[in-house]
Structure formats: structure tokens, C-alpha cells
Amino acid sequence: MENVVYQGYIEEETKALFETLPNYHFSYYDKKEVIPEEVLKNCDIAIGNLTKQQVEQMPNLKWVQLTSAGVEHMLWLPKEIVLSNAYGAYGKGISEYMLACALSIYKSLPRYEKNQREHLWEEYDSGYNIDQLHVLSIGMGSIGSAFLERMARLGATCYGVKRTLTQAPSYVKELYTLDALDAVLPQMDILGVSLPATQETNGILNKERLLKCKKDAILINVGRANAIVTSDLIDVMQMGYFKGVYLDVFDYEPLPKNNPLWNQERLYITPHISGRYTSHAHYQNVIAVLYENLKRHANKEDLLHVVDRTLGY
């Protein structure tokens, strides 16, 4: 019998599902701060996030399963402890968020909303049709791939950037590696960023690269904030670049009230909500990953989505 500590939101139906798995004893805690020391001491498997201090109190811990796709906040775990994530559970939901962002800017919906508050009757160009647009996904994991697949279905010409080249899926016209960004950016109307936080991705969209973009391009970041140099983005936008920018991830969260991003024209902020595992868009997908991995562990089979510590995802 292995002791599993589940930290985070969970529904009663999910508890009942997990309880059907043999050879596990589950303990559920909404917040990690309330997990008793005795429970930590006897924990073999943890689901959710832990602190370093808690791990130091867990001599039996052998595996941490995250409910998130992002892993950078847990890469400090000792290498003898297996770390796995919920890769693939967020692609559909986050890609639909990105699609909504792109369409809202192209159809000037934020501007009309602002005008409504001010009782202004003013018309704007309705923008290009989607089948006239070139869309680039910087990051071709489950999120970036799902975004391009949906844009392609609507008629856009789609391109992808990934760490290593593979055969392009049917909905992608061409794939590139990160070193091709300088040549590719000037051609693109929509840039979707869904990169993990690694040394390789840190600051890849700096001022020099942002100035290579079309002035009326749209930029959407749902990956990690480190990919875009925030101060450079503000400078470039104040020079008239970008028809609109949606950011769902930030260097500091919650975003401080005095951060200049709040007041930047044509920049729209959402509070890191595109990938919440508790939302209806993602919850069942995440639980499916957790359940499958628990079954695999019990059967001594290879786990899904084990994190490569050298790559950082």
C-alpha cells in the first residue's frame, strides 16, 4: 500500500474514481500549508505542488505528479524523485483562448467595448479575414499545435517554431527552429507564444526581434513570461508596433498595481487564467492524466510525461 497525498482542488467524483485504484491510500488537502507532518513523513507519492521544506520531511517520496504542464517551479526536486506533468491536458482550452484573443483584436472588440463605456459611436476597419492571415506558433507542444490546427481550419496559413525539426503536421505549411525567427517574424500577422521557461527560451523576443515584426501584428503569450523582455515590449509598443497584445503570463504574479503594463495602450491583461486546471475546459483532461499514471505506476509501467530535467520540460 502506497500513501498518496493530493494537494489542490478535487471533486468528490474524482475521489471516488481514485479510490477504485488498488494498493493506494489517498489523503486530500486543498492547501499544501495544512498537510500534517505525519502525513508528509509517510508519503510515497505526491500530486500537486510542494515546498522544499515539505520535501525534506518526506523520506519516502519517490514520485511527484504535477497538475500543471509547467514544471519550472519544481525543477529543484532531487533527481532521484521522479517528476511528471500534465502535458497535453491544456492544449484545446488554451488554444481556444488564443483564438478568442486574436479574433477580438482583429475585429476591434476591445476598442468598441471602451467606446461603449464612453458612449462613443465610432467605426473601425473590420480587419482581414482569417484566410488572409499568416500565423506563427512559437512553441509546438500541445498548446501551440492545437492553436495552429484551429487557425488552419478557419483558413489561415500556419507556421511553427520548435526546438528540433520534425515532419510538419498537415495543418502547418512549414516548421522552423528558433534560429530562424529573425527571418520568419516579418512575414507573420499573428504570433502565438507557448514556450516553457528554459535558458534557451529566455528573452528570445527582445527589442531587436520585436522590431522585426509587422507593425500591425498581433502577439499572444500563454507560455511563460521569460520569453518576452517586458521592458522591450513596452518600448516597441510605444513606437507604434502591434495592433494588439494579449498577455496571460507575467514576470511577477499577481501583476503589481504599479506595473506599466496595466496602462499600455493596445495591451490586454488576463490573470494567468488560460490554463487553470480547475476550469471546466481542463479539469477532466488533467484528471485523466493523473489516473492513467497512477494505473501505470501500480502496474510498474513507464509513466507518461516524465520531465527531462536537462531540457526543463
Image (cartoon, grey):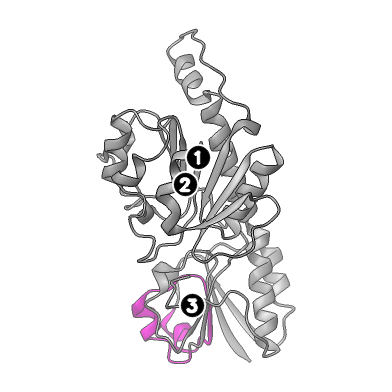
Residue 279 visible in the snapshot: no
Q: Nearer the viewer, mark 3 or mark 2?
A: 2
Q: CA distance from mark 2 to mark 1?
A: 7 Å
Asked whether the beta carbons under mark 3 and mark 2 sit within 8 Å of each other, the answer is no
| Depth order, front residue of 187/302 | 187
Q: Position of residue 276 (x, y in %)?
A: 54, 54
For disc 2, the neighbor class at 10 Å (few under 14, some 14 to 19, many from 20) is: some
Q: Which residue is mark 3?
A: 308
Residue at the (56%, 42%) spot, across then down? 135
The number of discs equals 3
For marks 3 and 2, the one nearer the N-term is 2
| Depth order, front residue of 108/285 | 108
Q: Is residue 192 above or below residue 38?
A: above
| Depth order, front residue of 165/15 | 165
- Quadrant in which residue 67 is drawn: bottom right
Q: Determine which of the numbered discs, if any, sits on residue 188 in the image.
A: 1
Q: Position of residue 186 (x, y in %)?
A: 44, 40
Asked whether the beta carbons under mark 2 and mark 1 sit within 8 Å of each other, the answer is yes
Q: Position of residue 146 (x, y in %)?
A: 64, 52
Check disc 2 and give the amino acid type: Val
For disc 1, the neighbor class at 10 Å (few under 14, some 14 to 19, many from 20) is: many
* Stretch in magenta: 36-60
Check disc 3 and give the amino acid type: Asp
Q: Determine which of the numbered discs, if any, sits on residue 184 in the image.
A: 2
